[in-house]
Amino acid sequence: MKLYYAPGACSLSPHIALREAGVPFELKKVNNKEKTIEGGGDFWKVNARGYVPVLELDNGQVLTEGPAIVQYIADQKPESGLAPKPGSFERYRLAEWLNFLTSEIHKQFSPLFKPTTPEDYKPVAKQNLATRFDWLDKQLEGKDYLMGKSFTVADGYLFVLLTWTKPTQIDLARWPNLAAFQKRVAARPKVKEAMQAEGLLPKAQERAA
Ligand SMILES: N[C@@H](CCC(=O)N[C@@H](CS)C(=O)NCC(=O)O)C(=O)O
């Protein structure tokens, strides 16, 4: 499998899922501004919508849309527990979380990153996010992860979205359960590996300096 990604973008969510599942994959880095692929290639030809993530399967099939991709990855290794069994009620809970994250959180962040967004819309988007974070923080009260004790692909997705609070200057300290969740997920070895591979963590030498 090949994962087309841009460092720190929402493609980090399937990247984490691939590592947590322990399935072999190759990373293809996309320049999201130029729509080019590292090593050569036109990203528009991979995804005509021009966005990551894209998962290219060994049989040539191409899967897009983060929530679909992470479920596909989880189902390659059911024993990983990254998603409840297909058909179970819990699986619909996972779908509920993924849909909430994509429509209510992810897409509220998007205008904050777009250079064309009018400055006076940004506080509106931030307020929308704050309202959702107020609710989300309560959901995480007394829980390690969104679905309870075990980490699922929804947690990887939420973690990535929370990393975006830094560049958008949203102070997570206001939501202690979200802040604790972010730390908990950041400490997972496979999450660290994914972040390291995307160049999002300082290298060992720089850390020591
Ligand atoms: N609906 C898509 C949205 C993906 C998306 O927003 N990708 C962003 C990065 S987080 C992107 O590549 N944007 C570049 C662009 O739209 O030009 C999904 O859920 O996978």
Image (spheres, helix red, strand yellow):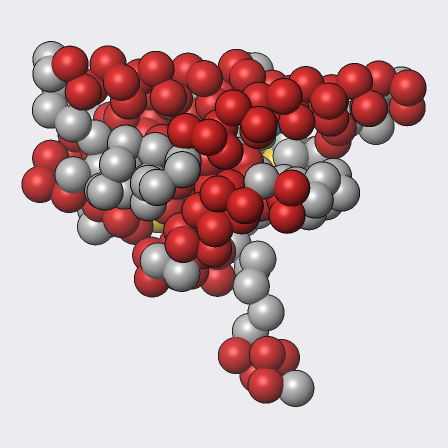
Where residue 24 appears, as percent x and y from the top left, is 23, 49
Quarter occupied by the C terminus: bottom right
Q: Nearer the viewer, residue 44 or 15?
A: 15
- Whether residue 46 is visible here, answered yes or no, is no
Look at the picture and state if 138 lies above or below 6. Answer: above
Quadrant of the rendered structure where residue 97 is? top left
Where residue 33 appears, as percent x and y from the top left, is 71, 34
| Left or right for 143, reference 170 | left
Q: Residue at x 52, y 79 (%)?
A: 204
Look at the picture and state if 182 lies above or below 138. Answer: below
Quadrant of the rendered structure where residue 113 is? top right
Q: Residue at x 79, y 18 (%)?
A: 124
Quarter occupied by the N terminus: top left
Where residue 87 appears, as percent x and y from the top left, is 11, 13
Where residue 168 appears, as percent x and y from the top left, is 74, 39
Quadrant of the rendered structure where residue 81 is? top left
Q: Residue at x 35, y 41 (%)?
A: 142
| Left or right for 102, reference 3 | right
Q: Nearer the viewer, residue 71 or 83?
A: 83
| Left or right for 124, reference 152 | right
Looking at the image, which residue sits at the far bottom? Answer: 209
Look at the picture and state if 51 lies above or below 191. Answer: above
Look at the picture and state if 207 lies above or below 144. Answer: below
- Whether residue 84 is visible here, answered yes or no, is yes
| Left or right for 68, reference 35 | left
User: Whereabouts is ligand 1, in terms of quadrant?
Assistant: top right
Q: Residue at x 18, y 20 (%)?
A: 90
- All told, the count of numbered labels is 0
